[in-house]
Image (cartoon, coloured by chain):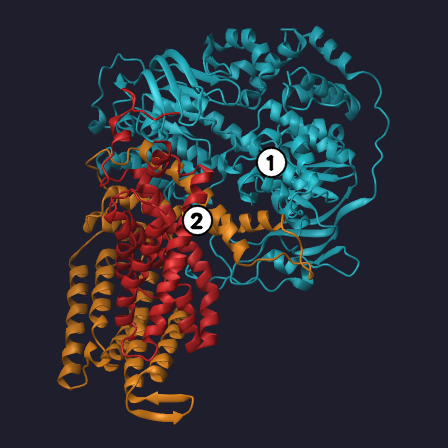
Chain colours: A orange, B red, C cyan
Amino acid sequence: MNASSALGAVAPSPLARRNPTVKLAILFIVSLVLLVVFDPVTPALLYLLGLAAVLGFARLPMRTIVLAHLPFVGFALGILVVNALSRPGEVLVDLPPIRVTVEGLLVGSALALRTMAIGILSIGFIGTTDPVALMTSLHQHARLSARVTFAVLAGYRMLQQLPREWQVIRQAQSVRTPFRENGATRFGISEFGRAAFTLLVVSLRRGERMSQSLESRGLGLGARTVWRPVPLGPADWLLLAGTLGLLALVIAGVGTLGLGLGPGILF
Amino acid sequence: MSAAPSTTTPAAASARPIHRFTLKDLVLIVVLGVVFGFLYWALVQAWTGLSILLGPAGDLAQHVLLGGWLLVAPIAVAIVRTRFAGVIAEILASVIEVVFLGSAVGPMLFVAAAIQGAGSELPFALRRYSSFGWGSYALSGLLGSGFVFIFSAFRSGWFGQDLFFLRLGIQLASGVILGGLLAKVIVEALAKTGVVDNYAIGRALNA
Amino acid sequence: MPRRGVSDTEMPTAAAPAVAFRDVTVTFPRQDRAVLRGASFSIAAGERVVLFGPSGAGKSTLLATITGVVPHSVIARVTGSVTVAGRDTLATEVVDLSRHLGVLPQDPDSAVCLPGVEQELAFVLENRAVSPADISDRIDAALAVVGAGGLRKRQTGSLSGGESQRVALAAALIGGPDILVLDEPTSMLDADGLRQVRDAVDAATRHGTVAVLLVEHRLDEYAGSRGVAGLPERCIVLGADGAITHDGPTASVLPTAAVDLHWAGCWLPGDIELQAALGLAAGLAAPEVQRALLALAGEGCGAPEVFGPVVLAGHDLTVSQDAAPRAVRRRPWPFRRAARTSSDGQMTRDGQSTRGGPTGNGGHLARDGRAEKRRVLLSGVNLELRAGEIVAVLGRNGAGKSSLLLTLAGLLAPAGGTVTGARPGLVFQNPEHQFLGNTVREEINVGLPAGSERVDRVLTEHGLGPLADRNPYRLSGGQKRKVSLAAMLVHERPSLLADEPTLGLDRWATIATIAAFRRAARAGRGILLCSHDLRTVATLADRVLVVADGRIVADGSVVEVLRQGDLLARAGITVPPLLRWLIARLDSVAQVRRVLDALDATVDAGATVPTVEAP
């Protein structure tokens, strides 16, 4: 059972029950490995596997999954197009000013699919992980110090209040700025900057008071207990081993078929 | 008012080692990460749509604002003046973006953050956290953007592209202006408001 | 009381006083004079003390010296010796002192730091290495003491101010401290919240197992109808120069110090204030005091006030809070959609035509992707504000008063109905939210041509001349409010809206604010303000609106409205004793106002604060 399930932020699912630190480690390892993979096949396979895992074990609403895809699909398309158009090599299409090269398409699609693969795993991670449980687990299982853990959690609480604070600041400042022709108030770079500065000042003030509160509650007294520990069990180790095994299998398989490419292709 | 240490002032306040964070420093660093994370997030919301519209040009246009992502490190270093403040500030900011704001870039942001934080902090560290002139800030922005450029270029396959040097130029310029000089403007404005009086920067001003 | 756990029993000398100060002087950098000067006192185990004094007398500094925040975290020079439970605070880290201290700060937002209530309370025990098996029971016990058992499963972000403060109080008590330090714990709350927190403090400290040091600047409100009996038994008074002037039983110190404190601008419990102002010690119940008050009231209701044309009106308004607490929308901001100028220069806002559907899309903040409805706070609101008129809106926190102001100001699109009138000014509750300049002069100058002569006039009028070149963020709370009010009034918009304009102010600053509002009204502005400060409302307002249950439930003169007991109960309004008596005995608003003005006039207003003109 998830330590912070009482907070209700995450729906129960097989993935939600797994240890957050383990999930973060998997995400991190897969991302690092993908960093040196420059063929399109490996990330494509990993994306499909990740998608299957998210659909099967994360129990996220379809709408959330689709919406969460939007930012990195856009990003991936950008990478694909830029690489296809701006990389020297064997010309595939030549319609000046547009010139698409084979190398460009290859590298571009590899990088775009890498973005997609990391993206789907991130969705699976973020969608099934309660941030508070993650911090608690990092404290327990990754030796993150108590002071950092609870400073971040206090920051999380502040973050929850920021949208409201931001809105109030925008309102409070816009009432002072003159109307333009169309009756609206201007909100350009300097107004954004001013509001951002106010948000910073107000938040730093609150942060100083929060640190006093945390200290007055005894944060940093020394050895501490953990009331409701986040569990770390055999199933979590199995998840870790299974995922890494699968990753190795994919890479080995693609390599055996002669489709694998390393960073050398860039140069 | 001279701040000559009186016998009753705790030694910790007057001669604090530059490698020890107080809880207050940590919370300040987190707050910087939270506020900038939130502001970036608000900007990115507006930005993503635009960059999809602009297509390849959007990819380049993003570089112009890159320096903005470096701000947290020099600000944290200038206020807290403690070793690794910049690196930790960047990493915490990226944790907040990924874990709490759900950034799509994923955990690669942690790595990028650590690299650019190290770059941003280096010029201050070399001067033992005692020099905060325009030059230090400009260098901070330059190194921060330069370090992270190498990583990004590898990650996004910019090496070997026709646009390589254009990208490098835009990012370095943005780093110096938005990630370096702007940080100094913000730090000084903050110091004038008094909210950072009780941090290392305030002790330095009172000395 | 929650019991001390097995693992945190390592306390030194059990017989030591909870707090002892010996000749303590505190000086901050950049200030020539000491904030706290030669303070000596001690608080015995289980003793209850109220610390009192004018603004800037060093009350907060004294508390911060006890908690060790001064000088460990806030830079200051401290001489003398301070001990807490026998430990020298100057030589002990703040966190080590936390074993002996429970602290309840002023601002509910920073009093609770973690996302969940349970977590917040468990945090204290975890830090003290209490065995996990005992924690749950102790959480229950601590919450029960403050009457907040029902809050255990809540997220802290969803708590009201009063609930937040009770949770913070439980967190302060759960470790079994030797002394509980309360720093103006109710000053940000409405009447209900104040009562809840005060009762919780009483319940938690009744048994004398924990010493209490309470700082409170609105003693009139905190003491409530119980007067001096509602305060801790012992009272320490700080003078304006930061030295302790009185120390003894509250019941005898307050009458002795009454005149000085009154002149220094302190808010005193009702009977004490009357003693200072009238020179009669017998309290409101005594016939001679009543006669003196009636004499101040005079005869007749004065000439009927004549107001100008309507400057701002709402027609069948539906007020709704647009922003869901967690999600930031990608849609254009409300005020950009809402404010449109029609051809005649008048602003017209039409809720129905400009508002899109309520969408809760996008962003991982609203990760469930659920669409939230716009929560309607008030509906069917019809109101008119005339030139020269001052109208007050009363009601609970969260009843929609602030949102009503935002809607009238064009910052929040109405969910229905229309607003007509020229663009109003709006003074927000937190003045820092509105600052745009780097100096007070720049602040006033925003939106005016550089070097406008109006700026100097307004600076002088509001007594801000000496502060003109200061950074607005560095001013005291009262000065900040003065700046934000002046910066709004300099624009001479026909109507002015103000959200809690006297919150946190001492009596001088309150009187100055009243004078500023009256000047603006005489100059022909229409003024609409939200306030929990009923005394200020009675002094100022020509008309009072009460919001409750999503509607405006009353609209009339102060006397008419405040006489309706059942209505006030519904709206969560508590009328202070003096005002209650005046409302009951006097027939006209003018008479009530004459009494309140006469009492205000007895406060030595000093050279820089404008004295109150007769109405």
Q: Is residue C309 left or right of residue C81?
A: right
Q: Is residue C378 left or right of residue C471?
A: right
Instruction: Tell me the amino acid under the disc marked 2.
Output: Val
What residue is pinned by disc 2? B185
Element under disc 2: helix
Residue A198 rendering spot, x and y as whole percentages: 49, 46
Instruction: Say above or below: C387 vs B48.
Output: above
Displayed quadrant of residue C99? top left
Taking the spot 29% from the left edge, 59% from the top edge, the residue there is B143
Residue B75 rendering spot, x and y as whole percentages: 36, 48
Mark 1 vs mark 2, CA separation in Å? 25 Å
Same-subunit check for callouts 1 and 2 = no
Q: Is residue C348 left or right of residue C255?
A: right
Instruction: Say above or below: A202 vs C420.
Output: above
Instruction: Say above or below: C10 vs C15.
Output: below
Q: Count the numbered circles shown.
A: 2
Q: Is residue B10 left or right of residue C453?
A: left
Residue in the foreground of this view, choosing between C409 and A250:
C409
Displayed quadrant of residue C425? top right
Taking the spot 57% from the left edge, 44% from the top edge, the residue there is C434
Element under disc 1: helix
**Which disc, if any, is residue C483?**
1
Residue C610 rendering spot, x and y as whole percentages: 68, 24
Instruction: Tell me the amino acid under the disc marked 1.
Output: Val
Q: Report the chain holding disc 1.
A: C
